[in-house]
């Protein structure tokens, strides 16, 4: 009997970026701006088509009005005004008339007629120097995106689905991740992306399996298809057979047992064999991670990325922010919570139109540059952080610092905010001030920067990107993205030494810290603070407990003679496999 091709299992191989296994139905998130097919219609269909558009416009109107109420409650009416503009664009009578004319006269489907008209308006405004007009471009884009999703029968905001799903997308923007119902998503399968793309980082912090670079899945998969996602081996399996499911069930059970054993020791300190204490913290982005952080075994939050809260609630008021930050601080007190000020720009583009499209966003107006140019926004955040510091131990660090001037300017604004709040009689705390070292110039100037701060935090995701001139999101150069490159290792060494000489602490919060194969190298380089996704804490602590500083320092001496990134990674991994074989797959243990 011939096998029905629709029943056979299909496997795609991608790059695993967050471990674990998930089995559910797919939810395929269409690219919002997939150009709709220009389909012909019969004259008798025109009324139906216009009815579809009216229904989509009405659904969009309700959605925008709900958002408007939500935002004005949280941030005040000024911020909610943007939605007035959106409603005007949505309800523009001439737009409706033009679309109707096209549908009835040219007999094209309403999706294409509406999309092409809006695209014409966007094209006219795209790239204009005038910032007001540029913002109108983004407003039109936003409204068009919402209407198109309704025309396609997709919902834009939560709840996107009422059952567990594996989210399939070309790529997920931070805005997509803040808008989805995170309680229903069991994993991500993404066509593009890389290990340090924000899809991967979010997946790790939510402890969800994720696989990137699954080329072609968007065309082949449909919402509702049964899929199995293997975040350990980077596989996505469509219609997994009974044998496959049974095989995975056995694997999952063994993995669970291993994780349980590590989990049981998660609250024990991470102390090397020779007694060196290493602080293990977590990286976090969302308030709902608080219980996970509390249970993770971490000693602190080493990096709280604040831009995700911002993207979820653009234009949030100082009170709203102070309340959100204080919730984290109070829940985790007396542990230190280090907030990073807004790092918008790059791939964390602000969708509300604060930023115009940039020709080269990663080298553009991002991180501290954007905050220093938008002091109203920056002060609002700093005041909220100072108020949160009244409830526990808070660190504030500045992202994308490229030199001393930016740190001094940011610190002065922080002091100015503290003085103003004190004069207003508002209770505040005294935060520890730090700088991210993620731009090579900051690492090269770390000795000077160290004089102005109380700690440095190595952001190796960007440090690798900028040192090697390798876009961290670009598939084509992904093979060149090597945190173990001798140039990156040297910059880490330089930063650690600068911190040590200045008597301040130096930590690492980039994804490199999560790779237990590189822990021997990082310990040997003198790092004593690691910040990783909550799910990684037990593994990392286990790794540290098996290492001896002198062995790690001997490794660094070897590494200093090496010029190949792969050999440096292998040297470190060999020490790791020897000291904690249980954290590696059987094959690798045997090869070591
Ligand atoms: C980094 O660059 O290493 C970092 C931690 O920041 P992000 O990944 O948010 O850019
Ligand atoms: Mg960074």
Image: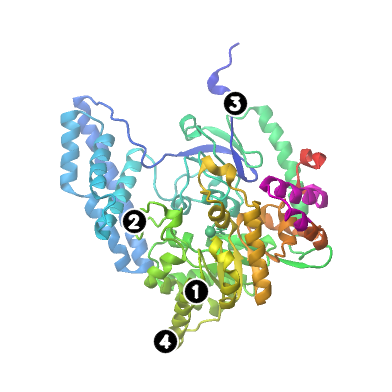
Q: Is mark 1 within 8 Å of ligand 1?
A: no
- 223, above or below 180, in the image: above
- 43, above or below 527, in the image: above
Read off the residue under disc 1. Answer: 385
Read off the residue under disc 2. Answer: 356
Please tell me whether mark 4 sits on a helix, a strand or a loop: loop
Q: Are marks 1 and 4 in contact (CB under 8 Å)?
A: no
Taken as a whole, is the magenta stretch helix, strand or loop? Answer: helix
Q: Residues within 10 Å of mark 4 (few under 14, many from 20)?
A: few
Q: Position of residue 367 (x, y in %)?
A: 46, 63
Q: Residues within 10 Å of mark 1 (few under 14, many from 20)?
A: many
Q: Quadrant of ligand 1?
A: bottom right
| Separation of residues labelled 1 and 2 (CA atoms) | 27 Å
Q: Can residue 321 be spotted in the picture?
A: yes
Q: Is residue 298 magenta?
A: no
| Separation of residues labelled 3 and 1 (CA atoms) | 51 Å
Sequence-wise, the earlier of marks 1 and 4 is 1
């Amino acid at each position: 009997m011939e096998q029905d091709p629709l029943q056979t299992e299909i496997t795609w191989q991608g790059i695993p970026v967050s471990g674990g296994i998930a089995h559910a139905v797919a939810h395929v998130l269409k690219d919002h701006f997939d150009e709709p097919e220009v389909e012909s219609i019969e004259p008798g269909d025109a009324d139906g088509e216009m009815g579809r558009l009216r229904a989509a416009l009405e659904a969009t109107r309700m959605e925008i009005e709900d958002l408007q109420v939500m935002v004005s409650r949280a941030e005040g009416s000024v911020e909610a005004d943007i939605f007035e503009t959106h409603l005007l664009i949505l309800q523009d009578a001439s737009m409706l008339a033009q679309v109707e004319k096209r549908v009835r006269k040219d007999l094209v489907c309403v999706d294409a007629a509406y999309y092409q008209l809006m695209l014409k308006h966007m094209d006219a405004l795209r790239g204009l120097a005038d910032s007001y007009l540029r913002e109108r471009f983004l407003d039109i884009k936003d409204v068009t995106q919402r209407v198109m999703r309704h025309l396609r029968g997709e919902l834009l905001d939560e709840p996107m689905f009422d059952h567990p799903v594996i989210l399939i997308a070309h790529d997920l923007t931070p805005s997509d991740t803040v808008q989805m119902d995170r309680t229903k998503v069991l994993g991500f399968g993404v066509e593009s992306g890389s290990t340090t793309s924000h899809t991967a980082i979010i997946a790790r912090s939510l402890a969800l399996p994720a696989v990137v670079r699954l080329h072609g899945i968007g065309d082949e998969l449909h919402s509702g298809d049964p899929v199995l996602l293997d975040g350990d081996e980077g596989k996505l399996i469509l219609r997994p057979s009974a044998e496959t499911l049974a095989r995975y069930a056995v694997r999952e059970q063994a993995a669970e047992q291993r994780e349980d054993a590590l989990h049981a020791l998660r609250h024990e300190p991470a102390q090397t064999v020779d007694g060196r204490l290493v602080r293990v913290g977590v990286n976090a982005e969302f308030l709902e991670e608080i219980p996970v952080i509390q249970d993770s075994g971490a000693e602190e939050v080493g990096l709280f990325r604040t831009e995700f809260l911002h993207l979820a609630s653009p234009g949030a008021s100082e009170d709203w922010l102070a309340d959100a930050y204080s919730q984290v601080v109070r829940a985790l007190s007396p542990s230190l919570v280090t907030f990073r000020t807004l790092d918008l720009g790059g791939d964390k583009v602000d969708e509300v139109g604060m930023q115009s499209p940039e020709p080269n966003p990663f080298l553009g107006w991002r991180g501290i540059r954007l905050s220093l140019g938008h002091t109203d926004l920056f002060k609002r955040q700093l005041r909220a952080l100072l108020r949160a510091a009244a409830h526990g131990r808070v660190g504030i660090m500045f992202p994308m610092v490229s030199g001393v001037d930016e740190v001094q300017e940011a610190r002065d604004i922080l002091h100015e905010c503290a003085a103003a709040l004190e004069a207003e009689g508002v209770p505040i705390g005294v935060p520890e001030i730090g700088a991210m070292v993620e731009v090579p110039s900051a690492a090269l100037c770390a000795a000077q920067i160290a004089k102005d701060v109380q700690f440095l935090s190595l952001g190796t995701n960007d440090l690798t990107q900028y040192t090697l001139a390798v876009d961290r999101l670009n598939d084509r150069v992904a093979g060149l993205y090597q945190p173990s490159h001798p140039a990156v290792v040297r910059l880490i060494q330089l930063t650690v030494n600068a911190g040590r000489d200045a008597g301040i602490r130096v930590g690492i919060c980039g994804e490199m810290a999560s790779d237990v194969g590189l822990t021997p190298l990082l310990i040997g380089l003198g790092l004593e603070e690691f910040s990783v996704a909550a799910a990684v804490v037990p593994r990392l602590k286990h790794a540290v407990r098996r290492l001896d500083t002198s062995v790690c320092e001997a490794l660094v001496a070897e590494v200093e003679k090496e010029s190949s990134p792969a050999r440096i990674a292998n040297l470190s991994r060999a020490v790791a496999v020897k000291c904690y074989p249980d954290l590696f797959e059987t094959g690798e243990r045997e090869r070591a």
